[in-house]
């Protein structure tokens, strides 16, 4: 298990003016379930006033970027659609460049499958025809879906994932996410996941760095997950702000991800 440690000597004052670019996780950081984290609207409004670059980066694949933009705008968050990216977008772009025309099966929801099909791939539930197995959050996952996925792996399909989160934060706790499905399939098939495209992958880092056009030392990542948000920052040389409003970090004596700052929620940024 992963643990997070805050560096106690770092001054937490003026965090909204210290950097030029701000990379926000969404679930558990900006909102939880259907409700914004207190202070979220004010944080984004202040960053806009200060002329900071902002991007929201999510591993959640159950909706489109347009839908996430509509949700945030409806809650009063002032952000343009082009400033939002998710694991679906990064996965789709990779597959379009490298596997257009190939056949895939996905444990994922309709929005995810539709976007992958838009990249020029063909969806199939026949394990003998599947070139690529894709795993992501599926709130309607069944035993039948797991068996189809297992048979795809037995027949030599590539083993990819849009994200590797073990759980997804919801209003009343957490639910099963892609990482748990991946673990089950790895044990069942004796195959290991080959690639994933969400946080903390290099694919996601490259995507937001291309958008930001700023060096890592001018950026900060704000998120609730140790194994994605904080670890991604550590690997990319980007400062991090760990918020305690989402997934709770397990405790371990030896930390493998170190946050530059830890705060209760983004409300403390104001």
Image (spheres, rainbow, N blue to C red):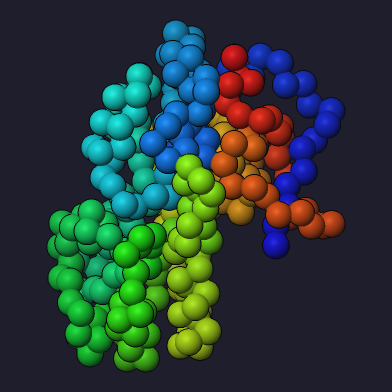
Q: Quadrant of residue 210?
A: top left
Number of numbered discs on residues: 0
Q: Is 151 placed left or right of 104 in the picture?
A: right
Q: Is residue 163 above or below residue 22?
A: below
Q: Is 22 placed left or right of 107 in the picture?
A: right
Q: Is 76 in front, or is 195?
A: 76
Counting from the top left corner in percent of width and height, residue 82 is at 29, 32
- Residue at screen point 32% across, 64% down: 140
- Residue at screen point 35% across, 19% down: 76
Q: Is 75 in front, or is 165?
A: 75
Q: Quadrant of the N terminus?
A: bottom right
Q: Is residue 82 above or below residue 44?
A: below
- Residue at screen point 59% across, 47% down: 247
Q: Is residue 157 visible?
A: no
Counting from the top left corner in percent of width and height, residue 3 is at 73, 52
Q: Quadrant of residue 97?
A: bottom left
Extreme residue toward the front, this view: 172
Q: Is residue 193 visible?
A: yes
Q: Is residue 254 above or below residue 126?
A: above
Counting from the top left corner in percent of width and height, residue 230 is at 63, 45
Q: Is 141 in front, or is 234?
A: 141
- Residue at screen point 70% across, 33% down: 262
Q: Quadrant of the C terminus?
A: top right
């Amino acid at each position: 298990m992963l643990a997070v440690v805050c560096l106690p000597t770092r001054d937490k004052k003026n965090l909204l003016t210290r950097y030029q670019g701000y990379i926000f996780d969404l679930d558990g950081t900006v909102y939880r379930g259907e409700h914004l984290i207190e202070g979220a609207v004010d944080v984004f409004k202040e960053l806009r006033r200060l002329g900071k670059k902002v991007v929201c980066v999510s591993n959640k694949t159950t909706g489109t970027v347009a839908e996430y933009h509509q949700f945030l705008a409806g809650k009063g968050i002032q952000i343009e659609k082009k400033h939002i990216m998710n694991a679906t977008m990064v996965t789709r772009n990779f597959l379009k460049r490298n596997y257009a025309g190939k056949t895939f099966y996905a444990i994922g929801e309709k929005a995810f499958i539709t976007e992958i099909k838009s990249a020029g791939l063909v969806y199939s539930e026949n394990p003998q025809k599947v070139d690529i197995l894709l795993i992501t959050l599926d709130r309607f996952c069944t035993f039948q879906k797991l068996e189809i996925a297992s048979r795809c792996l037995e027949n030599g399909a590539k083993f990819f994932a849009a994200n590797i989160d073990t759980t997804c934060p919801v209003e009343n706790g957490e639910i099963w996410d892609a990482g748990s499905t991946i673990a089950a399939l790895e044990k069942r098939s004796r195959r290991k996941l080959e690639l994933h495209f969400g946080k903390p992958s290099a694919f996601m880092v490259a995507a937001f760095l291309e958008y930001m056009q700023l060096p890592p030392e001018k950026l900060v990542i704000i998120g609730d997950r140790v194994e994605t948000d904080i670890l991604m920052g550590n690997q990319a040389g980007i400062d991090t702000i760990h918020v305690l409003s989402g997934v709770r970090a397990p405790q371990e004596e030896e930390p493998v991800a170190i946050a530059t700052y830890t705060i209760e929620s983004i409300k403390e940024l104001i």
